[in-house]
Image: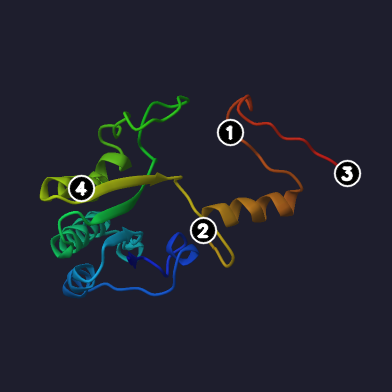
Amino acid sequence: MFVTGASGWVGSAVVRGSVEDLDVLREAAVSADAVVHLAFRHDIAFAGRFADAVASDAAAIEAMGSGLRPGGAIAVAAGVLGHGRAGATITERDGATPGGVGEARRPPSDAALALAGRGLRSSVVRLSPTVHGEGDGGFIASLVDIAREHGFSGYPGDGSRCRWELTG
């Protein structure tokens, strides 16, 4: 099994290491029975080049797919952000909201699912909009810092979907 994105938040929970070169990705896939693609070029996405990051992701998926033998498997991590209707449960039948971030990140998912036409077992695993962990300086870490500073955590909306119980 070949895993990409191992140095990221999701990937580091699975394995250590990273690769960015398309030829290296293709060659690694040749010797694998399956690929788990957890990488995304956040470095260039956060530098204002989101479309380039999406194109890079789709190219990586296509490269690895071209290296896998028929019958091989590829699982690609994607997000639920920008899918479904607000306030509704999101299922596998919900598509991306037109014009939103879900639609903007659609090309890599489409690239993965298209590999089924080449005899590969392909799937897209949708994760929460944010992941976090030790050393995180992002969104969730900021919310935790604010809650620690003020002694409580805010929640947008009427709170009907939250079930919090304070003890002690």
Indicate which label's residue lies in the foreground, 2 or 3.
3
Residue at position x 31%, y 63% from top? 41
Which mark sits nearer the N-terminus, 2 or 3?
2
Q: Are marks 4 and 2 in contact (CB under 8 Å)?
A: no
Left or right of residue 120, residue 4 in this image:
right
Q: Which mark is residue 156?
A: 1
Find the distance from the CA under tag 3 to the CA under tag 1. Answer: 25 Å
Q: Is residue 39 above or below residue 156?
A: below
Which mark sits nearer the N-terminus, 4 or 2?
4
Amino acid type assigned to the residue bearing label 4 in the image: Pro
Q: Are marks 4 and 1 in contact (CB under 8 Å)?
A: no
Which residue is labeled 2 in the image? Answer: 138
Dot 1 lies on which element?
loop
Amino acid type assigned to the residue bearing label 1 in the image: Pro
Which residue is labeled 4 in the image? Answer: 107
Residue at position x 39%, y 41% from top? 81
Amino acid type assigned to the residue bearing label 3 in the image: Gly
Amino acid type assigned to the residue bearing label 2 in the image: Gly
Spot occupied by residue 72 in the image (x, y as percentages of width and height): 22, 57
